[in-house]
Amino acid sequence: MGNRRNEIRSVAFVSLGCPKNLVDSERMLGLLANDGLTVTADAADADAIVINTCGFLEASKTESLAEIRQAIKLKEDGKCKRVVVAGCLVQRHKTQLLADAPGIDRLVGVFDREHIVQAVRGAKNPGQKDGHFLGKYHDMSRRLAAEAKLDGDAKQTKGSRLPVFEDDRARLRLTPRHYAFLRVSEGCNQGCAFCTIPSIRGPMRSKPIEHILAEAKELAADGAVELNLIGQDTTSYGTDIGYGPGLAGLLKTLDKSLKDVHWLRLMYAYPSCFGDEMIRALGESDRVVKYIDMPLQHINDKMLATMKRRVTRKEVETLLEKLRKWVPGVTIRTTFIAGSPGETEGQHRELVEFVRDFGFDMMGVFPYSAEPGTPMGRMEGQVAEEVKTARLEELMLTQQGIAFAKAKERIGKSVDVLIDRQEAGGKKGWIGRTAGQAPDIDSVTVVSGEGLHAGKLVTAKVTGAKGYDSVAEILGKKSRSLQVVG
């Protein structure tokens, strides 16, 4: 009776953080389901709860701890048997995490996601006396990340290589069937002074192109007609494995090989490495949408140097001008950081004016977060929280006016829209996206018409604007459909 009572039959899964973390969550869910565990959306009805955490910023740590404590409370109330915590927060703050949330049963580091079944079922890890699955790569990741920072470029770090997760296949996806995230690399060698990623995820490791292609075809066979290419630094793809064609070659190969995929979208590009061949590949490919996600973080030369971005304002402006000239109609998304250490009012004003003058299509702003272990986190001249907030709001209000105007400019134009879901609250409209709108982070296009469903691609005419979003109607016989598989 005791063994039956303690047996784990079902699991609830909470995935936090970025799309890279989401891919890890989907892979772990695939492993759990393949082992016979039932995946449930109701944590109160599960034998075990897994929280895949984000530890990138202090705010994400707070969110992760709240989810963990909620799961521990369910266990204390007798509604589940085990709480397993995985992901970046584990990799970064193991000791502190156990002190903050002593009810955790197992920890699984980012390099040991393949042990998730053992962790959920309660198996002991022979390599760790405490049973936690941090693996032999836990300390190595920090050492190699430090070497990558000292190296100062995107070359392969010498010594033992960390796993790249060359096989992200056999996932149980959390996204709708018609779109998916396709990871092309792991880790980062850029060494930005504000960033914790190298200390968590290690140095740059590219997935071999044949593995990427096999995974892309699997996702397409599962119904995905849009693949979003992700990595900590997609622009440096191939530099660590001697793949000469690099990102441009990867884009061209996927463009020619994926007949069942309609949209390929490039995310997380790095400005100092985005060469002419990449711009040409973006402009000349049929399936690669004319969209680029390129976080710039700042525009003032002194701030860029402080951030160790290895790019100047002039170089950024030259790149952006090329993108708009060589790829007509390109959508450019970026992000900035407000209130970094030492940022003066004049430097902030320069950034506001740059945003106003350039007119980004999509933009996000984060308040600077002083993260332990980063060079900028140790700097003097930390900016007061109220100043950060005020600067963030000014940047976003500047962009809001630009975005609202661009939404109005789209009125009267015909656009292809990929339908994601029906509007909430019993409304008849459907939420969709154009090629210039990435899932979850950008504005949307609300479409009305008959015969709509998730995964359908339609041609529609934009008839209005609601703030950032567009409103459109399908064009009758000109509407077309890409039916998701199954």
Image (spheres, helix red, strand yellow):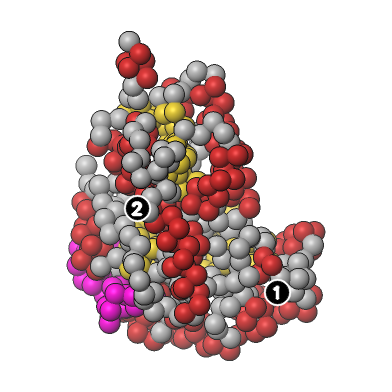
Res 415 quadrant in image: bottom left
Q: Which residue is mark 1?
A: 352
In the shown orientation, is residue 214 left or right of residue 458?
left
At which x and y percent is residue 204?
40, 69
Seen in the picture, residue 407 relative to 97 is either above or below; the reply is below
**Res 19 seen here:** no
234 or 129, which is in the foreground? 129
Viewer-nearest residue: 96 or 72? 96
Q: Amino acid at mark 1?
A: Val
Q: For residue 203, which numbered disc appears in the image?
A: none
Residue 201 horizontal side relative to residue 369, left or right: left
Q: Residue at x 54, y 22 (%)?
A: 76
Q: Nearer the viewer, residue 98 or 300?
A: 98
Task: Decide which of tag 2 and tag 1 comes sooner along the chain.
Answer: 2
Residue 223 in magenta stretch:
no
Q: How many numbered marks are there?
A: 2
From the top left corner, tell me how far across and down residue 186 is, in percent.
Answer: 39, 63
Mark 2, residues whose alpha carbon is within 10 Å: few (<14), some, or many (≥20)? many
* Visible residue check, residue 423: yes
- Magenta segment: 236-262
Q: Measure the alpha-carbon separation of dots 2 and 1.
A: 34 Å
State the residue at coordinates (44%, 38%): 130
Residue plotted at (66% across, 60% down): 369
Q: Specify whether residue 237 is painted magenta.
A: yes
Secondary structure at numbered mark 2: strand
The vertical placement of 53 against 232, above or below, is above
Q: Position of residue 457 (x, y in %)?
A: 33, 54
Locate residue 315: give its quadrant: bottom right
Q: Quadrant of the C terminus?
A: top left
Q: Which residue is mark 2?
A: 179
Q: Residue at x 71, y 70 (%)?
A: 379
